[in-house]
Every structure is written in structure tokens, then in C-alpha cells.
Amino acid sequence: MGQYYQTLDRPHFEYDLFTIDGLGDTYFRGPAFDQSKPYVACIGAAHTFGRFVARPYPAILSKRLGFQFLNLGVGGAGPLLFDAPQYINFANQAKFVVVQVLSGRSESNSLFDNSGTGSLMGVRKADKRFMRFEEFIAELMETESRERIIEIVQETRASYVHNMMNLLQHIYRPKILFWFSRRAPYYKEGFGSPWELLGEYPQLVNRAMIDLLRPYVDAYVECISSRGLPQKLWQSDKPIDGTWLEGGWLLNRYYPSPEMHQEAADLLAPVCARYIPGSRRTRQRGGVR
């Protein structure tokens, strides 16, 4: 996804993409890091990657705390993608790990299988069609009863909690679970559209699920914000994936804005400082659980 974002967003944003030996051909958000020096691993999706921002929260934290923060954000990623030997190896070599609360749409259920990708893309079992989870849910809502839809949502959530628990248990370094969203963990599902059912990022994840995950981490931080959204991007005569077109300008209404990344770093910094000996500590500003 890093290459995909860069292709769409150049020349307005430069993501300094690089690959890491041992992690295949995936391109990660720069700057490149020195593996011979201590580092913090930041596991997450596009919110961690930092689409449409010059400096995502891992880069802000790195400068503020004087320590390497490796941005392992992969757009559309779910826990299965990171619960693989190559990623676990990098996580367990880190000083500590920041684990973003990933999206529940990147999970499987009895009708949809994402085990081959570990992302929001998967196969509908009935016809072997490769599709996004949102498309699967939209078509399900057109053909199935509310009771059946609720059953599939419950299966998806159970799969998510199981896979997130496995990921967290396989990382033996100190872990900070990080909620980064425009909404609070509590939300009530609606059935008027797929978006009402899924909720805002991290889709399908609710407070009960977070409560189940918190015993597996050393700290939990929430950043709930919509500051800077919608974000005005650049002039265009047509939208690109992930944007809206309004008055001849592209708008970002989905990915965290620069202001949100700054707020995320402000909330994470005092917690991260606990695990960096001799770091430049910053004053705690709430959001820590």
C-alpha cells in the first residue's frame, strides 16, 4: 500500500519509502532506520503510515524523544498480517512496541476469508470472489436478515479479538496499545448502510473488545480527535482513492490530519518515555489509561 499511496499522492507528498531486509517487498514509510541501533516498532495501518501528512506520529515521537521509531504502518492491515515470524522478529528486537488498534474489517468469518492477505481484502467463500470487506458486507445486507448480519458481525469480532490476542502475546517486549480514531471505542451499530454498521475506523471494534485486549498490554492510550478534518489537499478535476472532490479541491475526510498526528504524539510521548532510559520526558497530557 505504501507504493500505492505514493503513486497517487506524488508530487504533493513524499513518503520516503524503503524496504527492510527480511520483510519482503513491502514498502514502509521513511525515513529509513539503522537496524544496528535501538529502536521502537510502531505496528499499524494507514493511520500509522501517515497518508497526507509530512510527519506522522512515529516521526514526531522520534524527534521529540531522540530515539528511532520504526514506522511499520501498512494500509488495510489486520492483526494476521503482523502475527507472522518476520514481523514478530522485528517487534521482539525493539525496545518496545506501539500497537495501533487495527480495523475489524480486516478479519474473517464463516462467509469471508482474509487469511491469505491479513488485510481488508479477502475471498467470499460462496463464490470465491476476491473483494474488500466493505463490499462483502454491503452485498450481505442486501440479501440476509438482520439476525444473520448480526451473527456474521459477532463472528468477525470474535476472530479479531482472538487474532489480536495472539499478536500481543507473541510480542514479549513492552507494548502500548494505541486507539487512534475520530470516535470513542463505544458506538452503536446501525443497519441503514454498511458504514452505519461498521462505524468509523477502526471498523467494528468497540469498548468490550478493547477491554478484552487491555490485559495483554503494558499501557493503553486513546487519541480521539477530528482536528484538521476535512483536510484540504490539492486542486484536481477528479477524485483519487481515499479523497472527496469539492469545488475543484481534493479533501481528506478519512485519514488523520497533521493536527491529529501531533495530538497523537502529544498523548503517546509521556508513555513512550517510560520505556526509553534517559529520554527527554515530556509532561503528561491525559489520554493515558
Image (spheres, rainbow, N blue to C red):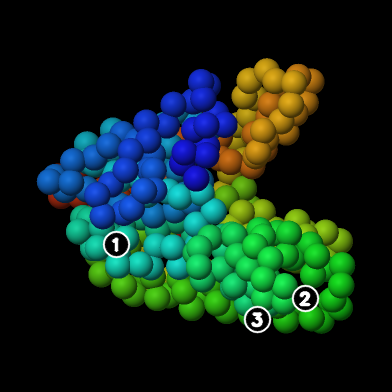
Q: Which residue in the protein does label 1 denote? A: 86
Say which label, 1 or 2, has the lower sequence index: 1
Q: Amino acid at mark 3?
A: Ser
Q: Which disc is residue 225 wearing?
A: none
- Residue beneath the point at 79% across and 81% down: 148
Between 47 and 3, the residue placed more toward the observer is 3
Q: Amino acid at mark 1?
A: Gln
Q: Would residue 247 appear left or right of 179 to someone viewing this image?
A: right
* Residue 280 percent across, percent down from the top left: 22, 39
- Residue beneath the point at 75% across and 56% down: 195
Say which label, 2 or 3, has the lower sequence index: 3
Visible in this render: residue 213? no
Inter-mark Cα distance, 1 to 2: 35 Å
Q: Which residue in the protein does label 3 denote? A: 110
Q: Is residue 227 above or below residue 288?
A: above
Choose top left, top right, bottom left or bottom right for residue 157. bottom right
Visible in this render: residue 89? yes
Q: Nearer the viewer, mark 1 or mark 2?
A: 1
Between 178 and 112, the residue placed more toward the observer is 112
* Residue 105 percent across, percent down from the top left: 62, 63
